[in-house]
Structures are given as C-alpha cells and as structure tokens.
Image (cartoon, rainbow, N blue to C red):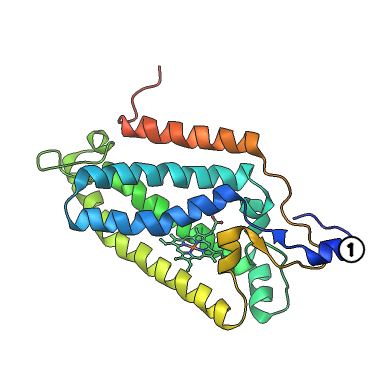
Amino acid sequence: MTETPASPAAGLRDVTVWDPLLRITHWSFPLLIPAMWWTAENSKWALHRQIGLVLLGLLVFRLLWGFLGPETARFSGFVKGPRAVIAYLRGDLAHGIGHSPLGGWSTLVLLGAMLLQVSMGLFAGDPYDGMTGPLNPLVGVMLADTITELHETFFWVVAGLIGLHLAAITFYAVRGDDLLSPMVSGDRPPMAGVAGIGAMPWGRAALAVGLAAGLALWVAYGAPPLT
Ligand code: HEM
C-alpha cells in the first residue's frame, strides 16, 4: 500500500485492495474444494485427480504471488509477529488495507492446510486397486496406504478451517466491516492517506503463472527426471 498525502480526490475514490489474480485464485477454492469432495464421494477418480492438479497449480501460484505480487498479496506485507496480533486483538493496532495481523495468519494456515491436503493426494491410492495420485509410484504401497488414510481424515481439518474462515467473515460483517465486497470487486471505500496497491505487475504475474503451471504439469507426468 502506498501512503500519500490526503487530498480531496483521494478521499472520494475507492482504493484497490486485492488484485485480480489473487481474487480469481481465491474464488476458485469455494468452487474446486466442494468439487474435490463430490468427486471423492462418488468415486469419480479421474476427475478428482485432474481437479487436484489444477488446485496444486493454483496453490503454487498463490505461494509465488506471496513473493512476486502486489503488497497486499505478499507474505512480507501481512505476516506479522505475535506482538502485532495481540495489539490488534486488544484493539490497540489499526491496520491499513489488506489482511489484518490475525487474517494474515489465518491465510497462511488455510493455504498451508490446502497445500498439505493436495500434496498427500499426489501420493495417495493403491496401485493394485483403482486410481492413484501421479506421485504414488515414488512411495511404497504401505506408506501410500498411510498417506491415503491421512488424506481422507485431513479433509475434515480443511473443512473445519473453512468453517472458521466463514464464521470470521460473518463476525466482521455483523460488526459492520464488509470484507466480502473487496474480495469480489477488488476495491474498498477510501481511507485517509492510503492509495491502494497500484499498477498490476503483469510481467511477474506471467512468470508466477508459468512456473506454477509448469510445476503442476511436471507433477501430473509423475515428476520425471529433468535431465
Ligand atoms: C473453499 C472455501 C474457501 C477457502 C479455502 C478460502 C480461503 C481463503 C484464503 C486463503 C484467503 C486469503 C486470501 C489470500 O491472501 O490469498 C481468503 C480470504 C478471504 N475470503 Fe475466503 N476462502 C473460501 C471461501 C470463502 C467464501 C465462501 C467467502 C465469502 C463468503 C470468502 C471470503 C473471503 C474474504 C472476504 C477474504 C478476505 C479476508 C480479509 O480481508 O483479510 N471465502 N480466503
């Protein structure tokens, strides 16, 4: 976020808080995670595997975007130490645009849990009985079996975290703090002295999308040696 001297014009315009790629990535989750659950419940394993690889690409993109994206997407912009979180919880710390110190940690936990879940899926399955993840041949049958059980159980941890996430958004909405509209449109009402995230870094976006898609494709082919 860029600090600017308060001016009448800046006071009237909405400020851009979330870039379009962060929003597309975010809204893919409520679409794809229920789809992953449905395909598993209905034994549509080929589709489950394909959507899982798309999710892997999106999550890797989001991690790269945490280093290459605009300020509100960057981990360095929103991951704060315990003191900042406690000060925020006590109401002693106002934050500008982007995640609050608490929201920053919930973002890390949600992304980490989804990445762990998708990663376990890559190794899951039984090669003698149905569909497997693309990296299943890299581990033994016994280990794959353990990972498969963890993958099934951990889904409920991810679901619980999503439930908490939705409860937090609702809690803020009830208090009159609308976090939802900015995650849809990218913009929020003006704040004194805050100019928003500025121009979209499309070159770095292309790099992050390319690297994430390349990694997901490589994994889809079973992570063959690169030489
Ligand atoms: C599968 C379901 C969902 C997952 C896994 C998920 C995950 C996330 C993550 C990781 C972030 C951080 C954004 C980032 O920096 O990349 C986030 C932010 C946000 N999500 Fe979700 N989300 C889900 C569903 C929803 C739904 C259904 C809503 C709306 C009702 C919602 C509203 C928001 C809002 C408003 C923010 C911004 C919070 C802030 O201002 O700090 N999310 N979500």
Q: Note whether residue 92 is visible.
A: yes
Q: Residue at x 24, y 38 (%)?
A: 136
The one of 76 and 205 positioned closer to us in this rendering? 205
Name the side, left or right, on which 136 lies relative to 115. Answer: left
Callout 1: few (<14), some (14-19), or many (20+) C-alpha neighbours within 10 Å? Answer: few
Q: Residue at x 73, y 63 (%)?
A: 14
- Pick the front one: 115 or 49: 49
Name the residue located 50 percent from the left edge and 33 percent from the top edge. Answer: 211
- The picture places residue 201, in percent across and down from the top left corner, at 67, 40
The amino acid at mark 1 is Ser
Q: In the picture, which quadrant includes the N terminus?
A: bottom right
Q: Examine the rendered structure and indicate whether residue 89 appears above or below residue 14.
A: below
Question: Which x, y percent locates residue 73?
Answer: 62, 52
Is 103 situated left or right of 112 in this image?
Answer: right
Q: Quadrant of the rendered structure where residue 190 is? A: bottom right
Give the residue pinned by disc 1.
Answer: 7
